[in-house]
Image (tube, rainbow, N blue to C red):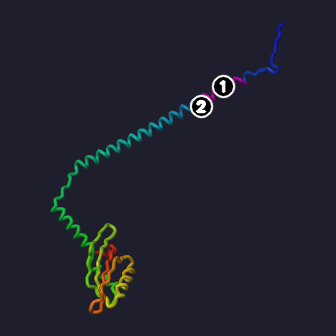
Amino acid sequence: MRTYINLSNRPFTNHRLFWITLAIVYLVCAWTLLWIMSEKSRVIAKADDTKQRIEGQKQLVAEKKREQDLKKQQTPKVVVTEQQATELAAARQMIQRRVFSWNRMISDIEEYVPKNTRIMSIKVDEILNTAEEVSARVQVKAIGTTANEMTEMMLNLEKSGGLFVVGEAGQEPVADSGETPFTLNLTYSPRRGNAQ
């Protein structure tokens, strides 16, 4: 007769649970390995796509640079003689003068001259013509019956809404006739529609 010796108080007799657990661990490991491989291939594909796009952009930039270099080589250099440069400068000055209307400037100044003041001379020092505006530095010499008329004219010009900006002003000694001559330096900025 055989004798079975059981050295454990509670021996483990259910081996199915052990194999099921081992199979689950194996499947989870296999699934994780497959997922890692698919993610790796997806990231590699995305990196390759990005690299191809970068290469394509580099080629486009290189082509544009080549085109610009070809245009620079094909475009003949314009050589302007001294006489042509002088004529060009004269033409630009004529265009500036044509854009600037003297009649409009004189009528604009007359609106702000006090009643007892006479304009002696108007001198345009510089005409600036930009894409946005036309402006001119103007020197006005006038004579008034009293010394206060220079101040009155300056105040009138300040109310012109930006049409005139008063710069330096100077008053000369009273003349023998009792009138007071004065000089105003103005910046005249006509509206685009009014300048022509």
The residue pinned by badge 1 equals: 23
Label 1 crowd (10 A; few <14 / some 14-19 / many >=20): few
Give the quadrant of the C terminus. bottom left
Asked if residue 90 is positioned above or below residue 171 in the image, the reply reads: above
Residue that sits furthest to the right in the current view: 1
Asked if residue 143 is positioned above or below residue 39 in the image, the reply reads: below
- Marks 1 and 2: CB-CB under 8 Å? no
Q: Does 104 sit left or right of 6 as displayed?
A: left
Give the amino acid type for the residue marked by disc 1 in the picture: Ala
- Of residues 91 and 48, the one drawn nearer to the viewer in this rendering: 91
Label 2 crowd (10 A; few <14 / some 14-19 / many >=20): few
- Residue in view at x 34 percent, y 76 percent: 167
Q: Give the structural element (helix, strand or loop) at label 2.
A: helix
Magenta segment main secondary structure: helix
Residue 162: which disc? Answer: none
Give the amino acid type for the residue marked by disc 2 in the picture: Thr
How much space separates mark 1 and mark 2, taking CA atoms? 14 Å
Q: Position of residue 66 (x, y in %)?
A: 29, 44
Q: Where is residue 29 in the image (x, y as percent from the top left)?
A: 61, 28
The residue pinned by badge 2 equals: 32
Start-end of magenta stretch: 17-29
